[in-house]
Amino acid sequence: MVFATHDGALPDAGRTLLHWLAGWWRIVHLGALVLVLAASPGSYTRARRAALARHVVESTAPALPWFGVLSALLSLVVIRIVLVTAVSYGLSQYALEMMVRVLVLELIPLAAALFGALRCTMPHGADIAALRAASGEGDSIPVLRGEVLPRVLAGVFAVLMLAAVSCVLTLVLAYLSVYGFTLAGWAGYTHTVGHVFGPAVSLIFVLKIVFFSIAVTLIPIASVLDDRPRAATRMSAEMQGLVRMFIVIFLIEAASLAGNYA
């Protein structure tokens, strides 16, 4: 009986692995299709441009004020902790550089990606699933071009905008926290920020935000477009998409840390 159980478990494990790998292939395939459609002039007719603009505004405008406030509060808390800690250990000259590295390079892009996923891209996946259930259509080219592409581009734009605005806001708050409302520290501040954002770090920073935005946008939508049966797994399509999204975010963040500090 023990051997029979193990023999039965091996095929189940193999099917689960194949199912998991097929899900990743689905994400890569959808990403390639969306990239081709995004580069196609036929995707930007007058009606489709209007739909794209509507999705961009609906995805970005409501989320930007809320995330701006949350990121400002988070930044002020972290800035205060770093300042007090640096002063207590006599390392105040390194406080500003630590703020920029911790907040702008690491925390704000990660928070923007997660907030954009919860506020924008995961609801987009739910909308596409509802549209498919109502129409009965699959992921044909007209569906991808008319429904999926505008939401993917809007999600990518929303995450990029959240990250950009919040990083600028954090840099302003860091300057005000260290130097106050004066321009006397502007030269030292720009020198420190420029020292942190060298060419290699700047490239890694931009690529990380871009890959974050693509990951949190494509993976939830690809998961709901998966037509394969769910009998082989206990997780729903949405939960599988969430797990895959966190795995990709973790890998991108690990690669970024390795590139910046290895």
Image (cartoon, rainbow, N blue to C red):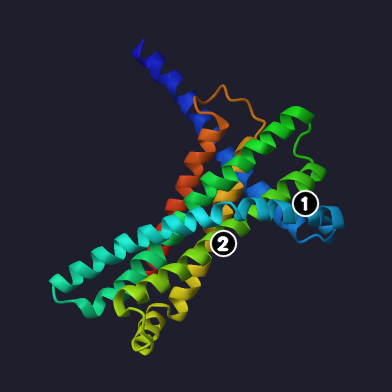
Label 1 Cα crowd, 10 Å radius (few <14 / some 14-19 / many 20+):
some
Residue 178 pos. (x, y %): 30, 76
Q: Residue furthest left?
A: 89
| Numbered label attached to residue 51 | 1
Q: Which amino acid lies under the numbered mark 1 shown in the image of this protein?
A: Ala
Residue 203 pos. (x, y %): 50, 73
**Which residue occupies 55% across, 50% down?**
216
Residue denoted by label 2 = 160
Q: Residue furthest front?
A: 181
Q: Where 131 falls versus 198 (above or below)?
A: above
**Which residue occupies 67% across, 47% down?**
30
**Which of disc 2 and disc 1 is earlier in sequence?**
1
Quadrant of the rendering where the N terminus is positioned: top left
Q: Which amino acid lies under the numbered mark 2 shown in the image of this protein?
A: Leu
**Which residue occupies 52% across, 66% down?**
164
Q: Toward the viewer: 258 or 123?
A: 123
**Which residue occupies 38% across, 70% down?**
173
Quadrant of the rendering where the C terminus is positioned: bottom left
Residue 34 pos. (x, y %): 71, 52
Q: Residue furthest top?
A: 1
> Which numbered disc, 1 or 2, marks the residue closer to the eye?
1
Spatial CA span between label 1 and label 2: 19 Å
Can the viewer see residue 32 in this picture? no
